[in-house]
Image: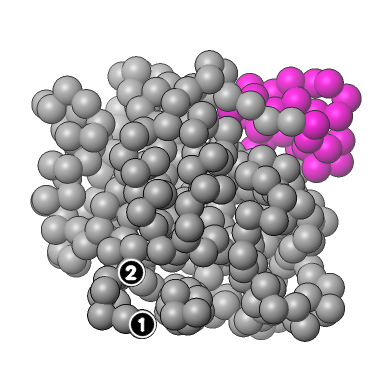
Amino acid sequence: MSKKIKKIICLGGGTGVSVVLSGLKKYPLDLTAIVTMFDSGGSSGKLRKELGILSLGDVRQCLVALSNENNLTDLFHYRFEKGTLKGHNFGNLLIAAAIGATGNLNKAIEKIAKILNIKGKVVPVTLEMADIIAVLKNNKKIKEEEKIINYPYLSRIGVKKLFLEPKVKANPKAISAIKNANLIVIAPGKFYTSIIPIFLIKGISEAVRKSLAKKVFVCNLMTQVGNTDGFTVIDFLTILEKYLGKDVIDYIIFNTGKLSAKQVKEVGKVFPKADFVKYDKSLLKMKNFIGANVTDRQIQRLDPADILVKGANKRTMILHDSKKLAKILLNLCRR
């Protein structure tokens, strides 16, 4: 890479973006997370309903991923186990308090970013409240992120279209970051409720298309029960292009690795119908498709205090290997 610091933008939801960021933050890069804001479940969803604020969980995860204060990160992830706060995340509550103290989310993030001494920036993709609406191929409408995730027949019936209600504008900070990026990474995550909604916001798709940055899509490791059952790498890409535009993505990173039989059994107890995203071997010969073993060999244990998350909206147990992913992305920066 040249001596000029590269600007990398990561688009998506909390866990996926935070995994990408945690690998990249070890390098001399200018990092920005542009985060989806439409969670309606869990601690974030409850605070949204009770306080009338935007969902905070994905913002919190990215702030923690970029933090240089390791002694504080466990505190920000802590979930209360008793009382009226049971299931709530301390980091979410602290950001909510910062919103009350400062008057808006942008200022609240700046305040928490100083406490955590983060490397980079965390930018909400919008500062306006909205819900995701899924219209299925049988014309049934499902409203709100949590209900979409927990609808068991979404992938069986098929999604005709997604939209936001009401329509919302992009955060100007997000547009500015996209325009000035050298590399734009669309991170893995819940496909219909974290990734696609980013591109439903007025101004985001256009900014990504017009940007001179290289665009990379990091495909999910696993299918999501009820939402993306049976999806292949090409299925993910085809639907993404429906909302972002054809031939906008320069590179697609997909996983070729597997878990041990013991790990497969352990994950299967929690997600019995989930499977690794399949791919056609012909993709391995294509220049814009990058197949690699990017599975983290360590399975994530679910937090028993995480009781506000319901049904299929469980936290993922299998993540990308952040170090391997970072090396691939850095090589793309050099091209």
Q: In the rendered image of this protein, does residue 107 appear above or below residue 257? A: above
Q: Which residues are magenta?
A: 132-160
Residue 102 at least partly seen:
yes
- Could you say which quadrant of the image residue 255 lies in? bottom right
Number of residues whose C-alpha sits closer than 10 Å to that of mark 2, classed few (under 14), some (14–19) or many (20 or more)? some
Q: Which residue is mark 2?
A: 6
Residue type marked 2: Lys
**Residue at figure coordinates x 29%, y 32% from the top left:** 85
Residue 262 at least partly seen:
no
Residue 34 point in image, percent of width and height: 40, 47
**Residue at figure coordinates x 62%, y 82% from the top left:** 293
Horizontal arrangement in the rendering, residue 14 relative to residue 268 (left or right): left
Q: Which mark is residue 1?
A: 1
Residue 93 point in image, percent of width and height: 25, 35
- Could you say which quadrant of the image residue 74 lies in? bottom left
Q: In the rendered image of this protein, does residue 172 appear above or below residue 142? A: below
Q: Secondary structure at mark 1?
A: loop
Q: Secondary structure at mark 2?
A: strand
Number of residues whose C-alpha sits closer than 10 Å to that of mark 1, classed few (under 14), some (14–19) or many (20 or more)? few
**Residue at figure coordinates x 25%, y 44% from the top left:** 91
Horizontal arrangement in the rendering, residue 250 relative to residue 9 (left or right): right
Q: Can residue 321 be found in the magenta stretch?
A: no
Horizontal arrangement in the rendering, residue 92 relative to residue 255 (left or right): left
| Along the viewing direction, whichever of 333 and 262 lies nearer the viewer | 333
Q: Alpha carbon of mark 1 to alpha carbon of mark 2: how far? A: 8 Å
Q: Are marks 1 and 2 in contact (CB under 8 Å)?
A: yes
Q: Which mark is residue 162?
A: none
Residue type marked 1: Met
| Along the viewing direction, whichever of 105 and 98 lies nearer the viewer | 105
Q: In the rendered image of this protein, does residue 158 appear above or below residue 33? A: above
